[in-house]
Each structure stands twice: as C-alpha cells, then as structure tokens.
Image: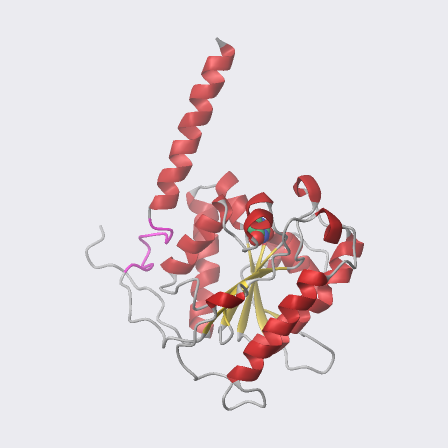
Amino acid sequence: MDQEIDIVKSIRQHLEIDSFLTGDFAVRGEGLVVEYMPQVPEQEAVSENLEQVQIKDTQKNSDTHMTKKDAITQLKELSSEIEKCRDCELGSSRVNAVVGEGSVSARIVFVGEAPGANEDKTGKPFVGRSGKLLTKIIEAMNLSREEVYICNTIKCRPPENRDPKPAEKQACRHFLAKQLEIIKPEVIVALGSHAAKSLLEVDKPIGQLRGKFHDFYAQQGAEPIKLMPTYHPSYLLRNYNYNSRKRVWEDMQAVLNELNLPVPTKNPTEK
Ligand code: URA
C-alpha cells in the first residue's frame, strides 16, 4: 500500500514538473516580461558536432584580431583535443566528452557544472531535464540555444554524477578558458555554485554570489568578462517555486540589460 502511494506521489510530482517545463519560464506580474521583441541578429552557429557547423552571418569577430573562420577552426581543434584528452581518470570512464555547443559569436556563454548521463550518452550539453529547463530560460530571454553557447566547467561525466574532484576541475580548466578566449562572450552565466566557484575561484555560497556581476579573467592580463552567477536549473527543478524562479529571472534580466537586449516588459494584458 505504502509503495502504491509512493508511486502515485512520484507520478504526480513528475507530471507537475513536466507541466512547469512546458509552460513559460518567465515570472509574470510585477512588470516582468512577456512581450517578445525581434530576435538579435542571426549569428554563426557552431555546434561541436562538426557536421552541424552552420554559417549564418559574419558579424562578430570580424573587427577583432580573430576572424570568424579562425574562431571556428580554433574551436574545432579544441574539440578534437578535448575528445582525445585523458588527463584525468574521467577520460577513461566517459562515453563521450561533452565539449559544448552553440554560436561561435555568442554574446552569452552559459557554463554548467559537468555532463550527466544524458549528456555523456549524446555528447551534447544540457539535454536532460535540467537542459529542458535551461532551454526554457533561454527562450524566455527571447534567445535560442543556437544564439548562445552552452558548456560545462568539466567536459567528462563524473561516475554516478558525483561532484567533480578538485584535480579533475584543475585538469579541465584550461579547456574552458580557451573556449571563452575564442568565443569572447560579453557575459558568462555561471549555472550553480560549482560553476561559479570554480570560475571565480572563491568559496562563497551561490546565494551570496548571484544577483550581481563579477569579473572573470580567461587568462592573466586578459580583459575581464562580466560573469553572472545564478542557480543551476537542477536546483530550480528541486525548488520550483515563485521565489527561486524570480531570482533566476532577475539575474537573466540583468544579463539582457547589460547587453542592451530587450528586457521583456510588462504584459499589458496581464492582471
Ligand atoms: N548539468 C550540468 O551542469 N551540465 C550538463 O550538461 C547537464 C546537467
């Protein structure tokens, strides 16, 4: 009997979460978003799955020392390096290295912690349940996954989804720094405390780090990149309530503001 109740409860929770995921992410009311503005100019999408490289436009990077073509070539080379990497023990337990995917011209890079089972299987970042929620968040910002870049602090799945060990993070750090150096985003969104702490090299709770921009340096002497820490989508899935959702949404609105992108405004039809 108890078992039956547990099954019913878990099916109900599952359905509730799924209905959240199929709804809009943005918190409505209090003057927050709903009216979607035209998309930012289409950019060059580079999936790390090399067959999927699509060239849509040649805007960003053309005025910097690195052309877009160079950036694509460098990301491809980096991908092969990561796929061959055996610098820590995760290199032998993984099915696929999960390099990252999105646009080489992305203005925003989302950085998660580490690939999970679905990501390990497919070689793509954020494709499981937390990935679906991340997609919702990106779409609520009136962007698409193809316009941003999504990756993780480490590129291989830790067995049983355990926390990455300091040595594993250290071994992988240069790959993420190189990705950021090639893409040169204007803003990095660190998803969750692991990503925020390892990028910023600080030991503070995510609740204290989120809500404001920090400076991230891809390498010594490099120009700082603005970094916004926020809650990880898997935390949101476990705590899908108005307050946690509102905090993430406020962080994303600050990111849009920073980039001079339209911040969804009050929906006049909303009560
Ligand atoms: N969680 C992460 O941090 N990264 C992924 O790619 C998937 C889940």
Q: Position of residue 153 (x, y in %)?
A: 65, 59
* Magenta stretch encompasses residue 169: no
Residue furthest out toward the front: 51
The percent position of residue 31, horizontal first and vertical second, equals 31, 59
The one of 123 and 172 positioned closer to us in this rendering: 123
| Res 41 quadrant in image | bottom left
Above or below, comparing residue 204 to residue 67 in the picture: above
Q: Is 117 on the left-hand or right-hand side of 247? A: right
- Residue located at (73% from left, 61% from top): 85
Q: Is residue 48 left or right of residue 178?
A: left
Question: Which contiguous range is marked in magenta?
Answer: 24-34
Residue under the point 68% across and 81% down:
222
Q: Is residue 134 above or below residue 5?
A: below
Residue 48 lies in what quarter of the image? bottom right
Q: Is residue 135 left or right of residue 156?
A: left
Q: How many marks?
A: 0
Closer to the camera, 224 or 64? 64
* Of 25 and 122, the residue lying toward us: 122
Residue 33 can be seen, yes or no? yes
Residue 122: x and y, percent?
A: 54, 51
Main secondary structure found in the magenta portion:
loop
The answer to which of 33 and 63 lies nearer the viewer is 63
